[in-house]
Amino acid sequence: MPLVTTEKMFKQAYDGGFAIGAFNVNNMELMQGIVDAAKEENAPLILQISKGAREYANVKYLRALIDCAIEDSGDLPIAMHLDHGDTFEICETCVNDGFTSVMIDASHHPYEENISLTKQVADYAHKNNVVVEAELGQLGGIEEDVVGVSAEDVMNHLTDPDQAADFVKRSCCDSLAVACGTSHGAYKFKSEPKLAFDVIEKIGNLLPGFPLVMHGSSSVPKEFVDLINKYGGNMPNTMGVPEDAISKASKMAVCKVNIDTDLRLALTAKIRQVFSEKPAEFDPRKYLGPGRAAIKEMVQRKLHVLGCAGKADICR
Ligand code: G3H
Ligand code: 13P
Ligand code: ZN
């Protein structure tokens, strides 16, 4: 089936108390690992491409890989999403390139500017049957060249629920990424992992039926960090969002959960392991292959955490 927007999958996710996994793609191994997992689990899927991914891989190559994925995955509902678009122009280009969903992340601008830029993108995208994710509040960690707030400070920059309700009405966005204590990357909390479920709940109550998005939702599994460190890596004091917290949010108004770091960890751990155990190996297929298999396994695990495994049929 052709690419879909997120409209139907979000409606089903909201009503059914699950969330859709949105996985970042940068190359063929990531694409194949993710799509194979979704096929095996019969899960709806969001493939997301960041500005950095567009530059790294050349968006034409990624688009061609997505076309292959569509052909290869039968009638799996798949959306192609721009992750963290920061200007009208990049969103416009993606709409014209056939993306079915774009994110305009204007959260670092003053409130009124965030609204007007989001509205400008929404007006253009909606004319072209493309849906729009916006962001309000400040996440932690680093995304592209924008440095978010520090892990210690995320709880002081949460999305204001009343502002969120006003923002959604005035900006005409179709979903909203909220700051609820998560950060991008592998160092999300200094001590105790904690999410502001009260913020999610309050926004959910003020905007019934409206889909929320949770960025920075990797759980940074210890076994992969341990493998990386065992085989020469240096990643001390990592901390992710516990999987039970992700499951809890997925049962609330959160309909889209963004995961990138966990896939990076899976790929890196396996490559390091091969390099360390077989130092004479120089065939990329012999280290990227195990990496791809680990990505697939990781995504399958996530689809169960989010509750969207087996939900492809109702999202079509
Ligand atoms: O939110 C950021 C995503 O993890 C994408 O990362 O901008 O390095 O591709 P990237
Ligand atoms: P993680 O760094 O937790 O995987 O978050 C990814 C993300 O939010 C992409 O937009
Ligand atoms: Zn993000």
Image (tube, rainbow, N blue to C red):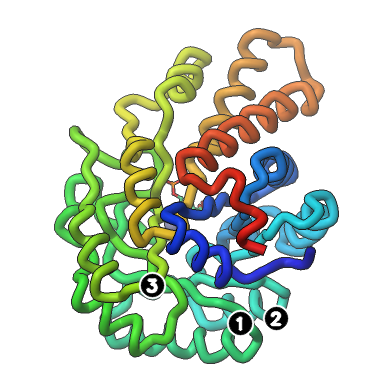
Q: Earlier in the sequence, mark 2 or mark 3?
A: 2
Q: Residue furthest top?
A: 277
Task: Give residue 231's position: percent from left, percent from top.
Answer: 52, 14
Q: Is mark 3 within 8 Å of ligand 3?
A: no
Task: Give residue 193's position: percent from left, percent from top.
Answer: 24, 38
* 218 on left or right of 125: left
* 120 on left or right of 124: left
Task: Give residue 185's position: percent from left, percent from top.
Answer: 40, 43
Q: Residue furthest left?
A: 156
Q: Amino acid at mark 2?
A: Asn
Q: Tell me the tag on residue 150.
A: none
Is residue 32 placed above or below 222 in the rendered structure? Answer: below
Read off the residue under disc 1.
92
What separation in Å lies between label 1 and label 3 (alpha carbons)? 27 Å
Q: Amino acid at mark 3?
A: Gly
Q: Tell me the tag on residue 96.
A: 2
User: Of circles 1 and 3, which is in front?
Assistant: 3
Check if mark 2's residue and mark 1's residue have beta carbons within 8 Å. Answer: yes
What separation in Å lies between label 2 and label 1 (alpha carbons)? 6 Å
What separation in Å lies between label 2 and label 3 (alpha carbons)? 29 Å
